[in-house]
Amino acid sequence: MRFLRWLIGLIILAAILIWIFTHPFGFLVRCLYILLLCSFLCLFRILGGPTPADRVVAVDILGILIVGFCAILCLATGRPWYLDIGIAWALQSFIGVLALSKYLEGRSFDE
Amino acid sequence: MNEIIGYIFIIVGVIFDFFGCLGLVRLPDLYNRLQASTKCVTLGTCGIMFGVFIITGWSPSGIKALLIILFLILTSPTAAHALARGAHKSGVKLWEKSVCDKYEEDTDTHR
């Protein structure tokens, strides 16, 4: 059963990667699709994480991925204000993860 | 020439992001996941940002990309450390094949 789940996941991942690399996309669009695939892997961990701490880790990683996504989007569209979104998102993600870790530790926020 | 070097940095960053998210899904334990995913994704996003900086040069976009690199390098290990400490204090178990737990021994001797 565990081997079957592993095999299904590998087949889906390989199919998506082959689809990305065989279609005639541009270079930056391929990078965007791979980052989107990484975001879906993070969503999988958010949905199925056994403990709350796993979900917090996945949310942290998702925030850092979105910062990189904004940077590639800035290059692909030529609009420089996507980097401002990246700065704001990095700040918010850091503060959110610190608050959630304090909550996991079982203390109040002002200690 | 600048564009080619920047694209190489972006490729390396995207590959590191992908392996970090793969580790987030595949590894057996919260602490293993935290270690793999935080290091890989931070290095990957910093690589993407450095590629954007090399492509755009010393323009406002490049300065913003450098600012995001500095910010991520400062904050992401801090968030991961706080998260691991909070998870350990909230009672998340280690993987059953883990060899040692120095933090637990340390807190035992202090009490």
Image: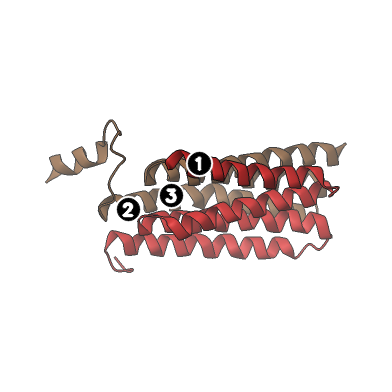
Chain colours: A red, B brown
Q: CA distance from mark 2 to mark 1?
A: 27 Å
- Residue B23 in percent (x, y) is at 50, 41
Say what secondary structure mark 3 lies in: helix
Q: Is residue B109 placed above or below A59 in the rendered structure?
A: above
Picture disc at residue B80 = 3
Q: Residue at x 62, y 49 (%)?
A: B69
Q: Residue at x 39, y 41 (%)?
A: B28
Q: Residue at x 84, y 37 (%)?
A: B4
Pointers 2 and 1 in contact (C-beta within 8 Å): no
Picture disc at residue A6 = 1
Q: Are marks 2 and 1 on the same chain?
A: no
Picture disc at residue B87 = 2
Query: Mark 2, chain letter?
Result: B
Residue A16 at least partly seen = yes
Q: CA distance from mark 1 to mark 3?
A: 28 Å
* Amino acid at dot 3: Ala
Q: Is residue B81 left or right of residue A41?
A: left
Q: Foreground mark, 1 or 3?
A: 1
Towards the viewer: B2 or A70: A70
Name, please, the residue furthest toward the top: B99
